[in-house]
Image: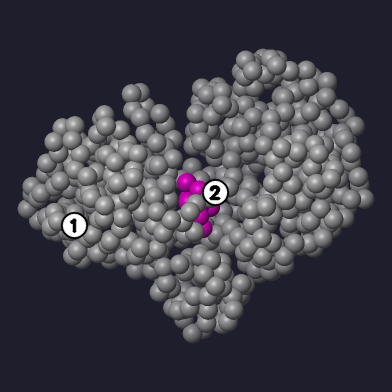
Amino acid sequence: MSAGAVKLPPRFLLGANYWSRAGGPRMWERFDEAVVKEELRALKAAGLDSLRVFAFAPSMMPHPPALDEGRLALMARFADLAAEAGLSLFPSPLVGHMSGENYGFPGQGARNDDRSLYDDKELRAWQTALVGGVVRALAGKPAVAAWILSNEMPLWAGAVGLQSGAPPEDVIAWARAMTDVVRAADPTRPVGTGDGMMGGWPTRALAADGVVDWVGPHVYYGDVDPLRHAFGIDFQLARARACGRPVVLEEFGASSTQAGEAEHAAYVRESVLTSLAAGAQGALVWCASDFDRHTLGLETPYSHHAFELGFGLLRSDGSEKPVCEELRALRALVDAIDFPTVTRPRARVALVASDWLERSFPFSWEDKGGLKRALLQAFVLAAQAGFDADVVNEDDPLDGYALVLVPSTQKLRVPTWHTLEAAARAGATIYWSYFSGENEFHQGAWCPNFTALTGLRHRLRYGCFDLPGERLTLKGQAVLSVPTGQQHHAAPQSLARLPIEPALAGVESLAVDGDGNLAIAEHRLGAGRVVFAAHPIERYLMARPDGSARDAHRIYRLLAEEAGLEPDYETHHPDVQARVLHAGADDLVIVQHRGWTASVDDASELPREAELVYDRGNPSARAFGPKGARVWRVRGVR
């Protein structure tokens, strides 16, 4: 049965990734039913309805290709216990990577160094046997909701750009073969691959080819800018939406070594609400329980990755962490929503991701991490300006978007440059900011229709770079002051500006720099316009710990005004975001303080008749606390 023919449960999934504290990855070798029952009871009481559970390959197949039928029977017993507790399961039948270590099949030994899990015939046969055995053992269990094929297969077996550098065609063929094994034994439930949308994994191709029924990002992101960090999950969910399949946030979380318990609770609250607002179908926290440092802490992977002991919602003694109170409140919220009637309204703002972010082209060199950070910075600025952007790929149509953002971009494929010009002529506002690239070779913007698109003429000198100075100051309709980082940058050419002058009639200056050079120009083009910035503004901001606190979002708000856009619900604070879900005739307005400031005013504009249905983390009715949130229902909007 092809992907999309079966569906995820018709509710917002609120769950966790599960290993019992009695054994961790080796729980099937040390299965303690009494402890498991208590854990399931506690997790259900904390508000969860779903668990992802793992079949650890060394435990399930200790003597390949034979399966350990006794341990498979324990998984089946676990499924019965989960059903009794009222919890749905997402089993992962193929697990060799776990918490910082890779575990090969027993007997594989050193041969793993030159054998690919994707195309080695013997290893493929072992994987087929393991996947088939787990699915057959559990397919008849009512608790099973869907299948998550693996756990971060790119880390276990490699992917393009990771470890083994496996060719994408090998990965796709492997994924198709393994999901076919699942569907042959259980054609009635959806399947994901558990890859986490890691770099190099062909997520889009698997979604487009019908191999997977949903896309499941795993997000563990850090940033020196608290606002960029806050939007790390939002951005990855937006990238996942672009794959055209339902989205589940399969993994996110924080260890007690990385976050205090109160801060952990606030982070989980923010992340779950973000998933709901972004249109995801659920969020699964990593993970259910802490592990004891005196027992599991002496075993791999925890003996060397000690921080992995502390990700739990429950402590190692079974007691609740403060996050459980947040989960109960979230449970009450999602239970009050008729989820099948809820839709995320179509975004009017699109953020274009260059194909160079995910693909490698011959004789082209780029820092993919830098490309991603520039896009994330732009995503944050759009949110601060009041707009929840879609992240679109180069092949995606731009129809219906009033504002299209192409931030700090050097390279797009030629048809995409033509598409941008056509979208402007059709009425869209296109914003493009210049980026010269990281390298001294192949410098400059790779845009073949520069003058037709922007109405400008550039005055580059071959092989030379027009550096911006230590600070960019913009004056005019767009105002900004930001350090460029030029003095200490390892590749200052990547900070270069583009010298420009008007070439066509109808070009208007929106800003000049501190030396009077044209810095932002608007070109009326057909029914729309193109706004071109001569500096890689987002690049300057992304390198700073306060990049999201320099009022650069005002430029994006100006762009939105040029495009005729206004926020549905205004918040009047750049760190407070309001997003809307349509729930039948009503609006659900999810208002979140995305920062850690102790208190910010709640000046959100909502109708007087709006009903408050959720209020957490806030010191008073007129203020938001750190990561505080409110959800309002506005009735009868449509």
Q: Is residue 361 above or below residue 140?
A: above
Q: Nearer the viewer, residue 414 or 267?
A: 267
Q: Earlier in the sequence, mark 1 or mark 2?
A: 2
Colour mapping used in the image: one colour
Q: Amino acid at mark 1?
A: Asp
Residue at image coords 52%, 82%: 622
Give the prevailing secondary structure in the magenta stretch. Answer: helix
Where does residue 305 sit, x and y in percent of width and height? 70, 40
Q: Secondary structure at mark 1?
A: loop
At 32% across and 49% down in the image, what residue appears?
Answer: 485
Residue at position x 39%, y 57% from top? Answer: 547
Q: Nearer the viewer, residue 234 or 537?
A: 537
Which mark is drawn over residue 221?
A: 2
Q: Nearer the viewer, mark 1 or mark 2?
A: 1
Residue beneath disc 1: 513
- Would you call the spot at circle 2 few (<14 residues within 10 Å), some (14-19), or many (20 or more)? some
Q: x, y percentage for residue 141? A: 81, 43
Residue 138 in view: no
What span is in magenta?
A: 229-239
Quadrant assignment, res 605 = bottom left
Q: The disc labelled 2 sits on which kind of residue? A: Tyr
Q: Cβ–Cβ below 8 Å for labels 1 and 2?
A: no
Q: Is residue 234 magenta?
A: yes
Is 80 left or right of 414, judged from the image as shown?
Answer: right
**In the orientation shown, which residue stands out farthest toward the front?**
487
Q: Residue at point 40% right, 63% down?
A: 549
Dot 1: within a 10 Å radius of its alpha carbon, few (fewer than 14), some, or many (20 or more) residues?
Answer: many
